[in-house]
Amino acid sequence: MKKPIHVIARFIYHLLVLFVLLFCTNSVFLLASGASDSIVMLLFILLTFFFWIWPAVYGRDIVESRVRQLWYGNIQLRIFLEALVITVAYTFIEVLVLHKVDDGVSRTVLGFEITASWSRMISHTIIAIVFLSITFWIGIIRIYVTSVQLGIRMRVIGVIFGMIFPVNLIVLCIMLRITSKEVSFENDKTIMNLARKDQKLCATKYPVLLLHGVFFRDSKFFDYWGRVPRELIMNGCRIFYGEQQSAATVESCGKEVARKIEEIVKVTGCEKVNIIAHSKGGLDARSAMCDPEIAKHVASLTTINTPHRGCEFADFLLTKSPEKLKKAVAGAYNSALLRVGDYAPDFIAACQNLTKSFCAEFNERVKDPEGVYIQSFGSYIKHNSGGQFPLNLTHGFVGIFDGANDGLVGEKSFPWGADFHLIAPTGKRGISHGDVIDLNRENIPGYDVREFYVQLVADLKKKGF
């Protein structure tokens, strides 16, 4: 995150907010019962309420509203932790005083004249719990609602261990670290995009057609490509989606892609499209370009982790799995996909079209058309825990047949076309089949998936596509 102009002012504000919250949580011992003290207490409560709703000073250097709210939640939880520690310590001192004096006897503690009694201690505990709880819940709701990087797993862990001390405090500290990194990363990215907005890095001559892989559909509720389309659009790109079936033969999906290309050309008058296809989508695109009338409307094809030479493990599963099991899985899948848009789902056929045997025959039969620039990208996981479920489980199994892989497809199957680029991140985990399209919306150290696609499309623009 960029260093804010008012760092000192924000630090002072942080201390003031902490002081106000501490004053409220420990007010029973810090105030007498006079009318003037009641007015002071009311003022402090109003200030605390203002901080709960709008901790404005903290967000001056945060550009995007969602990230700003995430930062507010992060700060509120930090102050909650600080106030909790100090209040517990102060309460402990009060308990020691109660053991040494009779009720109603005044003593000076931390510069304040107090009258120790167990009734006042009970009141103090209730008030402290109320103010600290409100601060915590506002903060935790803010980060639960606005954070992307916490993910489902971390949120579930937070719920499960939320009442188990001291594990809950450890989990909270982990959440604060995750959300702090998210705020910093996202704010820097927004600032960068604003700075280069006029450059329109991704304003290619022809629009971009995104083709999804097997077992997924294009949906407006859950974008298969994660945060990538929004990033491309922010940098001037025109985006379209293939909308082919999730599970069907390459030939069938290829015909759907062909119709989509004709539709885009007709509606926009763009003459050609740039195709970026992931996984089986790359085979669907190549099948569509078998038709010369379609191929002439394609400027470039970029395949991402596409099994151009198939997957040996798919051959193994289809030949070794019991027929009864295959029919049960296929029946359940086909039935479900009929309800969400597929008009003729065929689970088994889709799997067969990913085998090494099918792709060998496909590559002999289907030739790349002249005049279309074709390039390919691939990635791999460095160890079994490098990808999220279920790719962390399949990685080792796939490796037996296909060697280094992304959790589904072997590295040797990726290369196709004039250029091949292997994505080799600097991090320890590697890049899985899902990571490479931002399926999990995860910020991965050493691999900025959104910037990867921005630069990919910017390169297409430089090539005149």
Image: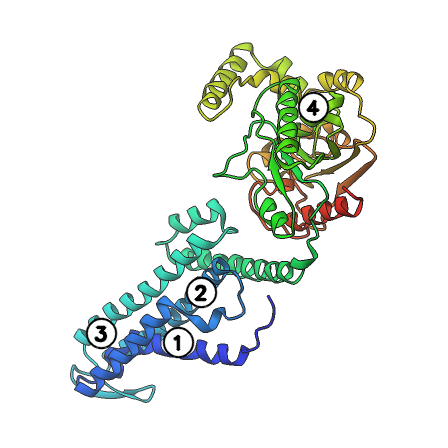
How far is the residue under mark 2 from the one under mark 1? 13 Å
Image depth: mark 4 or mark 2 in front: 4
Q: Amino acid at mark 4?
A: Ala
Q: Which residue in the protein does label 1 denote?
A: 17
Residue 221 lies, with reference to residue 69, above or below; the image says: above
Mark 2 neighbour class, 10 Å CA radius: few under 14, some 14 to 19, many 20 or more: many
Tell me what residue is drawn at x 46 percent, y 73 percent: 57
Residue 281 lies, with reference to residue 27, above or below; the image says: above
Taking depth in this image into account, of 319 and 285 the one nearest to the observer is 285
Tell me what residue is drawn at x 65 percent, y 50 percent: 236
Q: Which residue in the protein does label 2 denote?
A: 72
User: Which of the marked residues, 4 or 1, is nearer the chain's N terminus?
Assistant: 1
User: Which of the marked residues, 4 or 2, is nearer the chain's N terminus?
Assistant: 2
Report which quarter residue 102 is drawn in. Answer: bottom left
Which image quarter is the N terminus in? Answer: bottom right
Image depth: mark 2 or mark 3 in front: 2
Q: Secondary structure at mark 4?
A: helix
How far is the residue under mark 4 from the one under mark 2? 49 Å
Taking depth in this image into account, of 355 and 201 the one nearest to the observer is 201
Q: Which residue in the protein does label 3 denote?
A: 121
Q: Amino acid at mark 3?
A: Met
Q: Which residue in the protein does label 4 denote?
A: 288
